[in-house]
Amino acid sequence: KNEVEQSPQNLTAQEGEFITINCSYSVGISALHWLQQHPGGGIVSLFMLSSGKKKHGRLIATINIQEKHSSLHITASHPRDSAVYICAVRSSGGQFYFGTGTSLTVIP
Amino acid sequence: KAGVTQTPRYLIKTRGQQVTLSCSPISGHRSVSWYQQTPGQGLQFLFEYFSETQRNKGNFPGRFSGRQFSNSRSEMNVSTLELGDSALYLCASSWLAHTGELFFGEGSRLTVL
């Protein structure tokens, strides 16, 4: 049983498209993280959420605690957004659980 | 401000050996967490240290251990290496445990032959 489920697993978009990646989780959480991983391994934290909505440039992240669901949106996608996006939750007990990642390719 | 530094970046070991990996957090960060990433299992949580104390531990065998020093630098050790331990080992630091944003290092890529 996976504590964190992400969808879609793979996503191909044309440059400029609006993109949504979804994350559902089954445990009580203290925080949810959206991470970005480029080929080569480096991971960058995009957002840390415990409620509501956050925006950074073209990226928006939302979380619904009651429904145990979060979404990551990319507006006006660009080829440099091509990466793997990973949803991670820190449970109330302090454990980390990770989704399997969404591989995004943005075509010029 | 320097980022999270992991050493070594790449290493090759043989089965049965042991390995020690190092993580230097961002200056002022007191929490260090460790993760294993493999193509089959994805990212998995190993353990977390805060102020030299292990605060949380993932579901890994006792061959995996770690510690944190008074300057917040952390090491993890894997003893009696198995082929399945081949992975990218990542550490992340944060200002606070539980609610802190995570800053990741580039990782240490371990190959076990």
Image (cartoon, grey):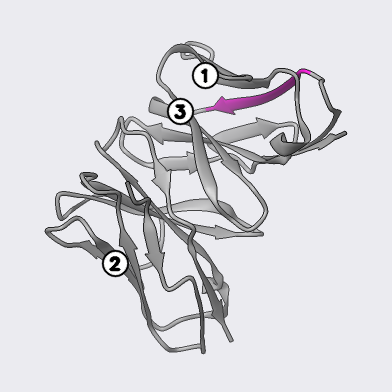
Report if residue A22 lies within the magenta region.
yes
Rendered image: mark on residue A39:
none
Do discs 2 and 1 belong to a common subunit?
A: no
The chain under label 2 reads B
Of the numbered discs in the image, which one, if any, rests on residue A32? 3
Question: Which quarter shows the N terminus of chain A?
Answer: top right
Check disc 3 and report its element: helix, strand or loop.
strand
Residue A56 against residue B19 in the figure, above or below: above
Q: CA distance from mark 2 to mark 1?
A: 34 Å
Q: In the rendering, at what x and y percent does residue A91 appear? A: 38, 33
Badge 1, how many Cα within 10 Å: few under 14, some, many 20+? some
B96 left or right of B108 in image: left
Task: Tell me if I can see residue B62 in this picture.
Answer: no
Tell me if mark 3 has few (under 14), some (14-19) or many (20+) residues whose alpha carbon lies within 10 angstroms of its own. Answer: many
Label 2 packing within 10 angstroms: few (<14), some (14-19), many (20+) = many
Which range is magenta? A18-25
> In the displayed image of the protein, which residue is found farthest to the left?
B70
Chain letter belonging to callout 1: A
**Image quarter of residue B103:** top left
In the picture of the structure, the residue carrying the numbered disc 2 is B75
Percent x, y of residue A79: 78, 36
Question: Element type at marker 2?
Answer: strand
Residues A90 and B102: in front is B102
The answer for how far apart the CA atoms under marks 1 and 3 are is 10 Å
Residue that appears at 49% across and 58% down = B106
Residue B90 lies in what quarter of the image? bottom left
Q: Amino acid at mark 2?
A: Glu
Q: Residue at x 20, y 55 (%)?
A: B72
Judged by its main secondary structure, the magenta piece is: strand
Quarter in which the C terminus of chain A is drawn: top right
B94 above or below B57?
above
Q: Nearer the viewer, mark 2 or mark 1?
A: 2
